[in-house]
Amino acid sequence: DQQVKQNSPSLSVQEGRISILNCDYTNSMFDYFLWYKKYPAEGPTFLISISSIKDKNEDGRFTVFLNKSAKHLSLHIVPSQPGDSAVYFCAARRRDSSYKLIFGSGTRLLVRP
Amino acid sequence: DAGITQSPRHKVTETGTPVTLRCHQTENHRYMYWYRQDPGHGLRLIHYSYGVKDTDKGEVSDGYSVSRSKTEDFLLTLESATSSQTSVYFCAISESGQVFENTIYFGEGSWLTVV
């Protein structure tokens, strides 16, 4: 029973265009969401996050949108760059166990030059 | 980079043998975690520690045990390795008990193959 789902295992985008990575969740107890980026042979690194009381958070080329009614969040990367090619994990934190994260299965993004 | 060292980084072992993975941190963070990453599952929490000698189970703890005798070291032991435990194991650390923004840091991973 996956509480955090990333239904697209992979995504290919042309350099300069927008990349949109999606994540769905099922648990209403999640109060905070994070996106991590992972390169091969490295650990995940934090990218951007959003609290459940907000619907948008922006950091440079990266924007995360949260639609609580749909239990859906998305990560937008504009413009996409070849260095953005990596696996992206969506993660969620429960308000009653804020020390641990529930991860999605990841989406592999390829940005073509 | 957060001061996290995982060892060994790669290991091949036989079914039924015990295996211990070590996570060492130089940040003096209170919380330490072991996750495993598998295709189609993302990262799943195995065990975590909230202080020396204080540990608890995560969502996939069966077949694993942990120990934390010092703040800086968190050991993950597979008592009798099985092929289903072939995975990439990530250690993580955080200073507080509340994960938000960039407050949890991951090691580089340990690749374990059980044959």
Image: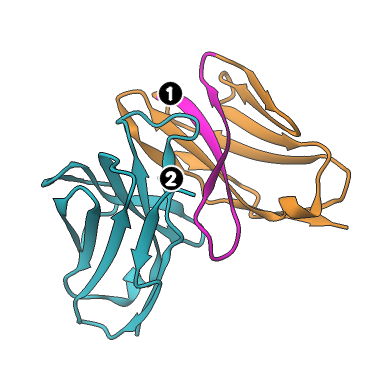
Chain colours: A orange, B cyan
- A89 vs B12, left or right, is right
Cα gap from disc 2 to disc 1, whole angstroms: 26 Å
Q: Magenta stretch mostly in which secondary structure?
A: strand
Q: Residues within 10 Å of mark 1 (few under 14, many from 20)?
A: few
Residue drawn 30% across the image and 24% down it: A96
Q: Is residue B77 above or below residue B58?
A: below
Residue drawn 23% across the image and 62% down it: B76
Q: Say which quadrant the C terminus of chain B sits in.
A: bottom left
Inspect the image, locate mark 2, and give the three-letter code of the amino acid beneath it.
Tyr
Residue depth check, mark 2 versus mark 1: number of the one nearer the observer: 2
Badge 1: chain ID:
A
Residue B59 at x, y percent in the picture? 29, 47
Badge 2: chain ID:
B
Residue drawn 49% across the image and 35% down it: B102
Residue tagged by mark 2? B105
Q: Nearer the viewer, residue B14 or B110?
A: B110
Q: Nearer the viewer, residue A89 or B52?
A: B52
Which contiguous range is marked in magenta?
Answer: A30-53
User: Do discs 2 and 1 share a chain?
Assistant: no
Residue tagged by mark 1? A28
Residue A18 at x, y percent in the picture? 82, 39
Which corner quadrant of the image does residue A55 belong to?
top right
Element at label 1: loop
Residue B10 at x, y percent in the picture? 40, 76
Rendered image: mark on residue B18: none
